[in-house]
Image: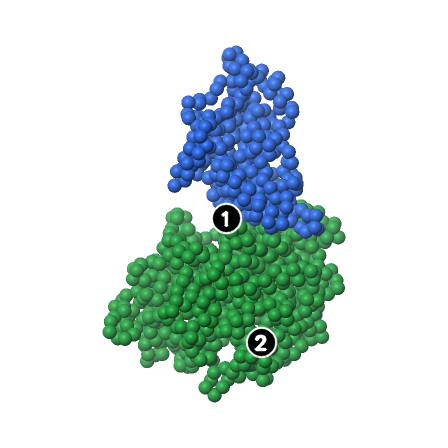
Chain colours: A green, B blue
Amino acid sequence: MAGLAPTYGRGAMTNAWTDIRNANLILSMGGNSAEAHPVGFRWVVEAKEKNNAKLISIDPRFTRTGAVADYHASIRTGTDIVFLGGLINFLLTTDQINHEYVKAYTDVAIIVKEDFDFHDGLFSGYKQDDVRTYDKSSWSYEFDESGMVKEDPTLQHPRCVYQLMRKHYSRYTIEMVESVCGMPRDQVQKVWDMIAETAAEDKTMTILYALGWTQHSVGAQMIRTGAMVQLLLGNIGQLGGGVNALRGHSNIQGLTDLGLLSNLFPGYIRMPSHEEQSFDKYIEARAKQPLRPEQVSYWKYFKRFHVSLMKAWFGDAATAENDWCYDWIPKLTEPLYDVLHTIERMKNGEMTGYLAQGFNFLASFPNKHKSIEALSKLKYLVVMDPLDIETTEFWKNHGEFNDVDSSKIQTEVFRLPTTCFAEENGSIVNSCRWLQWHWRAAPPPGESRPDVAIMAGIFHRLQGMYRDEGGVFPDPIFNLTWPYSNPEDPNPEELAQEYNGRALADLPSADGKTITHKKGDLLDDFGYLTDDGRTACGCWIFSGCWTRGGNMMDRRDNSDPYNVGITLGWAWAWPLNRRILYNRASARPDGTSWAPEKRLIWWNGERWAGADIPDFPWTSPPSAGAGPFILNQEGVAHFFGGSMMAEGPFPEHYEPFESPLDYNPLHPNNPAARNNPAARVFVNDRAQFGTSKEFPYAATTYRITEHFHFWTTHARLNAIMQPEKFVEIGEDLANELGIKAGDTVKVTSKRGFIRAIAVVTKRIHKLQVEGRTVHQIGIPIHWGFKGVARKGFLTNTLTPVVGDANTQTPEFKSFLVNVEKA
Amino acid sequence: MRGDQINLQNIVARSATTEPSPHVREGGVEKVAKLIDVSRCIGCKACQVACSEWNDLRDEIGHCDGSYNNPADLSPETFQLMRFNEYVNEDGNLEWLIRKDNCMHCAEPGCLKACPAPGAIVQYANGIVDFNSEHCIGCGYCVSGCPFNIPRISKKDQKAYKCTLCSDRVYHGLEPACAKSCPTGAIMFGTKEDMTEHALMRVGQLNDRGYANAGLYDPPGVGGTHVMYVLQHADKPEIYSNLPRDPQISPLVDLWKGITKPIMSAMIGLTALAGFAHYVMKGPKEEPEETPDEDIRREARKEDRL
C-alpha cells in the first residue's frame, strides 16, 4: 500500500486479523469492514465482547459496520485527510500523544532541508507549467559530514519534522473539518476524544481500512494520514494496534507480493527505469544504507534479493560477468504501466493485442465507454477467466446495458477458461500476509486449465516460434529456467519451492566452520541469500515458506501459548513468520513492555522474546539503539515522507476531481491546488469531467456483502440474496426528487448513465458543506449483463478516469452524478 | 435423516392425534435453543445462504423492492431471512436493526395446536417443532395458528414449510446450518439453559454499554421459544421489523381446537372412537420425562461436551 510503505517501511497490513481482538478501540474508516470482510469482522465483535472495545464507523453512509458500531459519523466522500489532519492538529495542540514512543520511534527530531517549503497548497519544487510533477530535491533532510541526518532531540528547531508537522496541520482546525467534511462539530469532537484516549500506554486503537481510502486521487495520502495518527498515539507494533489494510480479494496481497504490479518484481524489488542502464547504479539506488547510526536499514541487502531472483529466472545464464542478466530485464519508460495508462494507449491505437487475466476489464475500470472504444481498437483480445464475463462480450449488443454497434468492432476475442482457486492446490496470501496452503476441492470443469498451464503453453509456443522462425532479443526467451517436472503444467508445489529459494552451492556458516545448506537444499530463510550467485530465490520475502522442514504454509496448529491471538504454528506469514510488523515497538526503548496487557515481545536480558517472532535483530540489545522500523534508513517511522510520495512529504487535502465544491476550502484562491496537483490526467479524460452545476450530487461506489465483484452474479444463491441493481439515495433527496423506494431511477454522469432501483434510506443524509447542502448517492459496483442475477448496467459506466498520483488506482469513490426518476 | 427428518422416538406432541407417542425412553433429551444476538449481527445473510444450501432450497431470483430485504418475504423456499429496519431512537440517532426472521419453535406451538392433519406437525423432546410434510394436507391452519407469521404453503405441492431448526442436523449432534455459518457468532446454539445463561451475560454487557433496556426475548405467551433473541431494546420488540411484543396463539385456534378439530381429525384420520376419547380427555401434548436430579443431568451434559 503506497501510504504505508513510505511511513513504516512496508506496504502491508501491519497486524493480524486475530489481533484485532486485542484492540481497545477500532476505527473503521475508508472501508466498511462488516460489509466487505464479514468473516474477519468476528475479531471486531470479539474485541467488543471480550475486551470491551468500542467501534467507530466513519463513512459517507451508515453501513452494516455502522449497524454494530458504538458510534457512527457521516463524512463527505473524499475528505478524510481533512478529518485526520484535524485529528493530528488536535492531538498535537492538546498534547495527547505517546511522547516516549514518538521521540524514540519516529523522525520528529530530524531536520529538514532549508529550501523545503509549502505555500498555498503546493510544496516546493512544483513544475506548474510542466506535466503536473514536482522536483522533489528539497523534500529531504539535512545531513552531517558522515552522511547521517541532523537531529534536534529537543524538537525546538524550526525545521525539525515535529515543528514542520505542527505548522502544516495547524490549518486543519475543527471549524475547517466541520465545514469541509460536513460532519457536525460535536460529532468530530466526540470521535477525536475517543481516539485520543488511546495515546495511553495501556490502550491501543486499530484502524481498519480498505478501498474507501485507496480509491481516491489522494488515496495513498489518506492512508498515510491515518498511519501518522497511529504513530502519534504509539499504536504501531502493538497488540491491538496497527493500520490494517483489509484486502478486497482473497489473494490480492499475494499479487503485490509476487510482483504483479507493473513496476515491481517479486518481493517489492523496484524495476529499473530506462534511465538506469548501469547495473551498479541500479543496485546502489536501491541498496539503502542507514541514515542514522546503528540502524538496520534492511534494504541494504537489496543486491542479494535481486541477484538471487535473477538466478531463479535465468539460472546458469546469470553471471557476475553479464551483471546477472541486467540487460535482459525490462526498463520502464513510465513510472507505472498501470491500467489507466494501458487503456489510454489501447484507445490511441498503440496496442495490437491484450491478455486479460484475472479481471473483468470492461466491468472493473472507469468509464466503460472508453474501455469499449479501447478494446475495439485491438486486433485480438484474450480473456482468461473461469467465468463467462462481460469483457468477452464487450462487442455484443445487450440492449441498453451494452449498447454497441457490433458491426463496427473487428476485435477477435479468444476465451481461455481457467480453473478457480477451489480447483487447484496452492497458497493464498491473506490480508495479514499469511500464506495459507489449500487443496483442490473439486476437479475443474470442461476444458478449463490452470492459469499457470495456459501461460506455460503460451511460453512454449513462443519459444518454439523463436526457435523455428527466429526473432528479436531471443536471449531471455531461450534462457528462462523451466525446471518443472511437467513443463506444460508446472505444479504449485514446485513454484512455491522456487519462491522459497535454494542453495546453488554449499553455503558455509558465518564462522566458516560448518555448512548451513548443501547444494540444492531449500533455504531456511532469506537471511541465507547471497549476492554472488550461490543462491536462487524467486521471491525473497517468501523465503521460509517451504524449507527442508517441508511446506510451512499447510501447518494448522492454532495454539496460542501467550493467549494474545498469535498462532505461529498456523500457516506461515512473511516475513519470517512474523505476525505483527514492527513489533519491537511493542516494548519501550529500554526493552520492557508498555503495559502488562500489551506484552508482545520484550528484551529478556539476552535476546528479544515473547509471543511473536521479533521483527528486529534478535540479539540487538536496547542499549544498541536500533529503531523498530528496520526497513527505513533512519530506523524510525516517517511523519515526513521525503520524496517517496508524488504529491508531498505531508498529506494535504485536495478535492476529488469531480467535487461538489469548485475550489479547495484550504486554498480557495489557488486553482492549481484544487485537485491533487501531482495526479496524471489524460487530456481527453479531463474533458470528460463534469461540474457540480450539471451533476449536483456526490457519488461513491462500493461492494455489498451479498456479492463479490462481478463473480457472484453468476451464482444463483448470491443472486437470490441480492437480485437486482440498486442505488442508495437519502430520504432528504428522494423526497425532493419525488423518488420512492423501489422506483427505477436514472443516474447520469458526464460519461454515461445507468438505471437502477432506488433504495431510499435514512442511512444517507444531507450534509452541510461550506455553507450549502450536499447530497451523496451510493452505487454498488455489482451486476452486469452476464450471469444469473437480473441484468444490470455496469456501474463503471459512470466513473471518471483519474487515479491516485502514486498508484494510479482509479477514483471510484468520489465523483459527480445527477439523479432523476426514470 | 435428510428427506425423512422425523425422529419418531422423541416426539412429545403431534398434531391432531389421540394416541400417545412412544415414550419408553428415559429422558436424556435436553431442551435446545438457538440464540440470535441481534447486537452482534451484521446482516450478512450467510445464514440465509447456508439454510438454502443445507435444505436444498432455491427461491426465485426476485427483485429489489427498495430495501436490503431479499427475498422480500419468507416462502416455501426461504425458511429464514434477514429483515432490516431503520430506526431513529429517542436521542435522534439512527440504528439499523437487523433481525433474522425464522420459526421461533414455540414451547406451545400454535401451528401444532391448529393443525388438523394427524402427525403433520410434531414437537420433539428437545423442543424443536417440525413439519412432517408427508402428512400435511396444505390447509393453511398452521399459518393462522402461528403468532409469528412463519409457515408458508407451497404452490408446487400444497404443503406447509418452515424452518426445521435443522432437526436433522441437531439429531446427529450438529448445530443448525445458520449457526454454523455465522461469521460473527451472532447465532449460537446449545441447550436452552446454556443459551439463556449466555444471553443474560450479553444483556448485562449491553446494559453496561448504555443499552438500559437490553433484554432476552423468550416470550411467555407461547410458553417460551426455542429460538430466542438478545435485543438492544427488549422493551420495544416491534421496532425489530414487527417482532410481536406479546405473542399469543389466536383465540380462534382454541375455538377451532375445541370444536372443529376433533371432528375434522376423526374424518381425516378415520380415528377410532377410543382414540378420540383419549384425545379429548388427555389433550394432544405429553410432557417429556424429566430426570429428577438436575445435577446428574448437568454432569451428563458436561461429558457430552468432552
Q: CA distance from mark 1 to mark 2?
A: 43 Å
Callouts 1 and 2 close, C-beta under 8 Å: no
Depicted A8 relative to depicted B212: above or below: below
Amino acid type at mark 2:
Tyr
Q: Tell me what residue is drawn at x 48 percent, y 26 percent.
A: B288
- Between disc 1 and disc 2, the foreground one is 2
Q: What kind of element bears circle 1?
A: loop
Residue B183's tag is: 1
> Is A168 situated above or below A400?
below
Q: Position of residue A84 (x, y in %)?
A: 61, 66
- Give the chain of mark 2: A
> Does residue B222 appear in the picture of this structure?
yes
Residue drawn at x 70%, y 67% as measured from the top left: A175
Q: Residue at x 44, y 69 (%)?
A: A591
Assess disc 2: are there few (<14), some (14-19) or many (≥20) residues with their C-alpha within 10 Å of its C-alpha: many
Residue B228 at x, y percent in the picture: 56, 38
Query: Looking at this rendering, what residue extends furthest in the left direction?
Result: A513
- Left or right of A79 on screen, residue A355: left
Residue visible at 48% across and 58% down in the picture? A19
Query: Which residue is tagged 2?
Result: A162
Q: Looking at this view, is A728 or A156 the one in front?
A: A156
Give the numbered dot on residue B5. none
Chain at numbered mark 1: B
Q: Secondary structure at mark 2?
A: helix
